[in-house]
Amino acid sequence: MLNADNICPSTPLYTCSGGNVVSIQLGSAASTAMNGTISTLIGRLTALTSLSLDGFKNLTSTIPAGLNLLTNLASLSFFGCSLNGPLPVDNLTKMTYLRLGGNNFSGTLPIAKMTDLSFLSSSGQSFTGTLPSTMSLMSKLVVVYLFGNQGLTGTVPDLSLLSNLVDL
Protein backbone atom coordinates (compact mmCIF):
# COMPACT_ATOMS: atom_id res chain seq x y z
CA MET A 1 0.00 0.00 0.00
CA LEU A 2 1.41 3.37 -1.02
CA ASN A 3 1.20 6.09 1.62
CA ALA A 4 3.14 9.17 2.70
CA ASP A 5 5.59 7.10 4.76
CA ASN A 6 6.48 4.97 1.71
CA ILE A 7 7.03 8.04 -0.46
CA CYS A 8 9.22 9.80 2.10
CA PRO A 9 10.52 7.46 4.82
CA SER A 10 12.43 9.20 7.62
CA THR A 11 16.15 8.50 8.06
CA PRO A 12 18.79 9.76 10.51
CA LEU A 13 19.62 12.53 7.99
CA TYR A 14 16.13 13.80 7.30
CA THR A 15 12.66 13.57 8.80
CA CYS A 16 9.40 13.31 6.88
CA SER A 17 5.83 14.00 7.79
CA GLY A 18 2.85 13.51 5.49
CA GLY A 19 5.11 12.68 2.56
CA ASN A 20 7.11 15.90 2.91
CA VAL A 21 10.67 16.43 4.11
CA VAL A 22 10.37 18.60 7.23
CA SER A 23 13.90 18.42 8.65
CA ILE A 24 17.40 17.97 7.20
CA GLN A 25 20.25 17.50 9.69
CA LEU A 26 23.59 16.87 8.04
CA GLY A 27 26.99 17.31 9.59
CA SER A 28 29.88 15.66 11.43
CA ALA A 29 31.31 12.76 9.41
CA ALA A 30 29.32 13.58 6.29
CA SER A 31 30.53 17.19 6.29
CA THR A 32 33.97 16.45 4.88
CA ALA A 33 32.65 14.25 2.09
CA MET A 34 30.10 16.65 0.61
CA ASN A 35 31.10 19.53 -1.62
CA GLY A 36 29.65 21.74 -4.29
CA THR A 37 26.68 24.04 -4.03
CA ILE A 38 23.26 24.10 -2.44
CA SER A 39 20.77 23.23 -5.15
CA THR A 40 18.41 25.87 -6.46
CA LEU A 41 15.71 23.24 -5.94
CA ILE A 42 15.91 23.86 -2.17
CA GLY A 43 12.92 26.18 -2.59
CA ARG A 44 10.70 23.20 -3.44
CA LEU A 45 11.00 21.80 0.10
CA THR A 46 8.21 24.08 1.30
CA ALA A 47 7.33 21.93 4.34
CA LEU A 48 10.91 22.15 5.69
CA THR A 49 11.05 23.44 9.27
CA SER A 50 14.70 22.71 10.10
CA LEU A 51 17.86 22.79 7.99
CA SER A 52 21.34 22.16 9.41
CA LEU A 53 24.44 21.86 7.23
CA ASP A 54 26.98 22.53 9.98
CA GLY A 55 30.64 21.95 9.14
CA PHE A 56 30.34 21.57 5.36
CA LYS A 57 33.55 23.49 4.63
CA ASN A 58 33.42 22.49 0.97
CA LEU A 59 30.12 24.28 0.30
CA THR A 60 31.60 27.39 -1.25
CA SER A 61 28.64 28.94 -3.00
CA THR A 62 26.06 31.57 -2.37
CA ILE A 63 22.68 30.60 -0.94
CA PRO A 64 20.02 30.13 -3.63
CA ALA A 65 17.21 32.70 -3.51
CA GLY A 66 14.78 29.76 -3.24
CA LEU A 67 15.69 29.44 0.45
CA ASN A 68 13.44 32.45 0.99
CA LEU A 69 10.46 30.34 -0.19
CA LEU A 70 10.76 28.02 2.83
CA THR A 71 8.29 30.00 4.90
CA ASN A 72 7.85 27.16 7.43
CA LEU A 73 11.57 27.17 8.28
CA ALA A 74 12.08 27.76 12.02
CA SER A 75 15.68 26.56 12.46
CA LEU A 76 18.58 27.27 10.12
CA SER A 77 22.21 26.45 10.83
CA PHE A 78 25.08 26.87 8.38
CA PHE A 79 27.80 27.02 11.06
CA GLY A 80 31.33 26.36 9.80
CA CYS A 81 30.59 26.22 6.08
CA SER A 82 32.29 28.39 3.48
CA LEU A 83 29.15 30.04 2.17
CA ASN A 84 29.19 33.64 1.00
CA GLY A 85 27.09 36.42 -0.44
CA PRO A 86 23.71 37.72 0.69
CA LEU A 87 21.50 35.61 2.95
CA PRO A 88 18.02 35.32 1.37
CA VAL A 89 15.92 34.75 4.49
CA ASP A 90 14.01 38.02 4.88
CA ASN A 91 10.62 36.30 4.32
CA LEU A 92 11.20 33.56 6.91
CA THR A 93 9.01 34.93 9.69
CA LYS A 94 8.80 31.64 11.67
CA MET A 95 12.55 31.55 12.35
CA THR A 96 13.46 30.84 15.98
CA TYR A 97 17.07 29.63 15.58
CA LEU A 98 19.63 31.16 13.19
CA ARG A 99 23.30 30.08 13.34
CA LEU A 100 25.61 31.47 10.66
CA GLY A 101 29.18 31.71 12.04
CA GLY A 102 32.11 30.43 9.97
CA ASN A 103 30.87 31.78 6.64
CA ASN A 104 31.24 35.06 4.77
CA PHE A 105 27.69 36.33 4.37
CA SER A 106 27.31 39.93 3.22
CA GLY A 107 24.65 42.58 2.73
CA THR A 108 22.26 43.53 5.49
CA LEU A 109 21.40 41.15 8.32
CA PRO A 110 17.88 40.09 7.22
CA ILE A 111 16.22 39.48 10.58
CA ALA A 112 13.69 42.35 10.73
CA LYS A 113 10.64 40.06 10.30
CA MET A 114 11.90 37.24 12.57
CA THR A 115 9.88 38.24 15.63
CA ASP A 116 10.01 34.71 17.14
CA LEU A 117 13.82 34.54 17.03
CA SER A 118 15.33 33.18 20.26
CA PHE A 119 18.90 32.33 19.12
CA LEU A 120 20.99 34.45 16.75
CA SER A 121 24.64 33.65 16.11
CA SER A 122 26.11 35.58 13.24
CA SER A 123 29.65 36.29 14.32
CA GLY A 124 32.51 36.91 11.90
CA GLN A 125 30.39 37.77 8.88
CA SER A 126 30.57 40.68 6.43
CA PHE A 127 27.11 42.08 7.14
CA THR A 128 26.73 45.82 6.65
CA GLY A 129 24.26 48.51 7.63
CA THR A 130 22.35 48.85 10.87
CA LEU A 131 20.57 46.32 13.04
CA PRO A 132 16.81 46.48 12.51
CA SER A 133 14.86 48.49 15.07
CA THR A 134 12.48 45.51 15.32
CA MET A 135 15.15 43.73 17.40
CA SER A 136 13.79 45.63 20.39
CA LEU A 137 10.47 43.79 19.86
CA MET A 138 11.98 40.29 19.66
CA SER A 139 10.82 39.33 23.15
CA LYS A 140 11.88 35.69 22.76
CA LEU A 141 15.57 36.49 22.15
CA VAL A 142 17.79 34.60 24.59
CA VAL A 143 21.18 34.61 22.83
CA VAL A 144 22.65 37.13 20.36
CA TYR A 145 26.21 36.78 19.00
CA LEU A 146 27.17 39.45 16.48
CA PHE A 147 30.86 40.07 17.20
CA GLY A 148 33.24 40.35 14.27
CA ASN A 149 30.73 41.98 11.89
CA GLN A 150 32.93 45.00 11.13
CA GLY A 151 30.44 46.43 8.62
CA LEU A 152 27.56 46.84 11.06
CA THR A 153 27.05 50.51 11.86
CA GLY A 154 24.73 52.74 13.85
CA THR A 155 23.34 52.22 17.29
CA VAL A 156 22.16 48.97 18.79
CA PRO A 157 18.36 48.99 19.22
CA ASP A 158 17.14 49.26 22.81
CA LEU A 159 17.16 45.69 24.11
CA SER A 160 16.47 46.59 27.75
CA LEU A 161 12.92 45.20 27.66
CA LEU A 162 14.01 41.77 26.39
CA SER A 163 13.66 39.92 29.68
CA ASN A 164 14.74 36.54 28.22
CA LEU A 165 18.04 37.87 26.85
CA VAL A 166 20.91 36.27 28.80
CA ASP A 167 23.86 36.46 26.39
CA LEU A 168 24.73 39.41 24.16
Image: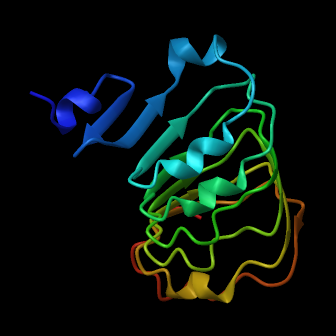
Is residue 29 something one can see in this rendering? yes
* x 51%, y 38%: residue: 52
Is residue 121 something one can see in this rendering? no
Q: Is residue 29 above or below residue 157?
A: above
Q: Nearer the viewer, residue 139 or 85?
A: 85
Residue 46 lies in quadrant = bottom left
Q: Percent from the top left, x then y, of residue 27?
A: 52, 24
Locate the N terminus and report the quarter of the image it occupies: top left
Number of numbered tags placed on the structure image: 0
* x 62%, y 27%: residue: 55
Task: Judge left or right: residue 121 versus residue 8.
Answer: right
- The way the protein has been coloured in the rendering is rainbow
* x 39%, y 25%: residue: 13
- Please identify the residue farthest to the left as the structure is shown: 1
* x 63%, y 63%: residue: 89
Residue 120 lies in quadrant = bottom right
Q: Nearer the viewer, residue 97 or 2?
A: 2
Residue 12 lies in quadrant = top left
Task: Judge left or right: residue 156 versus residue 52.
Answer: right
Locate the C terminus and report the quarter of the image it occupies: bottom right
Q: Percent from the top left, x then y, of residue 31?
A: 60, 19
